[in-house]
Image (cartoon, rainbow, N blue to C red):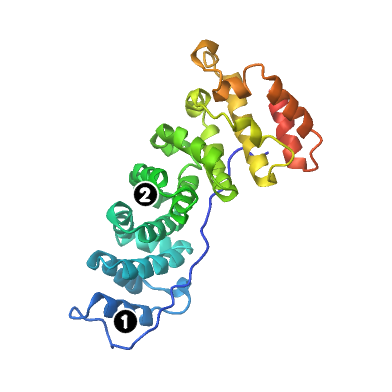
Amino acid sequence: MLHIIISDLPPMEDYTIHRVHFGKASESLHPQEELQVVMEEIPPSSHSMDADALQKLIHLLKATDDPLIQEQALIALSNSATFSVNQDIIGNLGGLSVIGGMLLDCAPAVKEKALNALNNLSMNIKNQEEIQVYIMQVCKNIESAPLNSDLQLAGLRLLTNMSVTNAYHYKMINKIPCFLHLLSEGSERTQIQVLKVLVNLSANPATTRHFLKAQVPSLLSFFDNCINRDILLRALVFAANLKKNVNNEDGITTEDEYSEDSVFSMLCRDSAAFAQKLASLLHHPDTDVKEQVVRILTQ
């Protein structure tokens, strides 16, 4: 039964550049030249990148403020971090704080590449303990980024990984209205990505009251046979999680504290419109969709 969405990984990127041979890296080299030297020394497979090559990439990030160099180094680190052994090495070399520092004042494209790298690195539980200090900054980047942008999606992917367990949900609770806004206004790609975060958060009873108070006038429109299956299924899991938590926790259904257009009013109060939509979805051709509808109706 689907309650929590599994972790997310961004696609690997091509970090190939036009290379010029300068011999061994030297302190006298310009950062762009040093990048070319480092990239020339990196083996074709990111899996075979050793600690020395990773250390050089981390050094480059610390040494330059050139956005193009930062992007290339971050892409290389992100690709290498798809392998668990490199996740450990980068963490042990202090790379997490260097990459996390890119989320503050860098160009949007650099922030996106930094988020992709942190996302891959967050597959390591030990690394999550250090990455969690950047969650609030990640949320700020998501909120301020252009709607449906690659930067916004990269931030949502990282939050998906960081919300698989309840450990860091408290850092995201205050951004629930932002996430619900993205659900209402975003493209299908954004809706799917933000729903992954919402499903993870809604599985935690500590977040339930925050969700129920939120106002999402368009919420019922997601429970329709014509909706993209990936969106519909996740919306149903989200609703089922909330219904389960409401039924299991005393005092959460004091109705006078919820407005008419709140999530509580639409999903939990005797809503004829929601009940009608669920009844229609019982005839949906997808088995997983029908399973979640039954889960909601039997709670």
Q: Quadrant of residue 162?
A: top left
Which picture quadrant has residue 76?
bottom left
**Separation of marks 1 and 2 at Cα, in angstroms:** 29 Å
- Residue at figure coordinates x 47%, y 36% from the top left: 166
Q: Residue 184, position in %: x, y?
A: 55, 38
Q: Is residue 83 left or right of residue 286?
A: left
Q: Which residue is mark 2?
A: 131
- Measuring 28% from the left and 80% from the top, which residue is drawn there? 33
**Circle 1 — which element?**
helix
Using residue 227 as the reference point, say whether residue 117 is left or right of it.
Answer: left
Q: Position of residue 126 (x, y in %)?
A: 40, 50
Query: Image quadrant of residue 295?
Result: top right
User: x, y (%) of residue 224?
Assistant: 71, 36
Badge 2 marks a residue whose secondary structure is: helix
- Residue 15 seen: yes
- Against 217, is 55 above or below? below
Q: Is residue 18 above or below residue 218?
A: below
Assign the N terminus to one quadrant of the image: top right
Is residue 288 or residue 65 the one in the foreground?
Answer: 65
Residue found 82% across the figure and 35% down from its top = 283
Q: Out of 114 and 126, give the one closest to the viewer.
A: 114
Q: Which residue is mark 1?
A: 37
Depth check, front residue: 141 or 241: 141
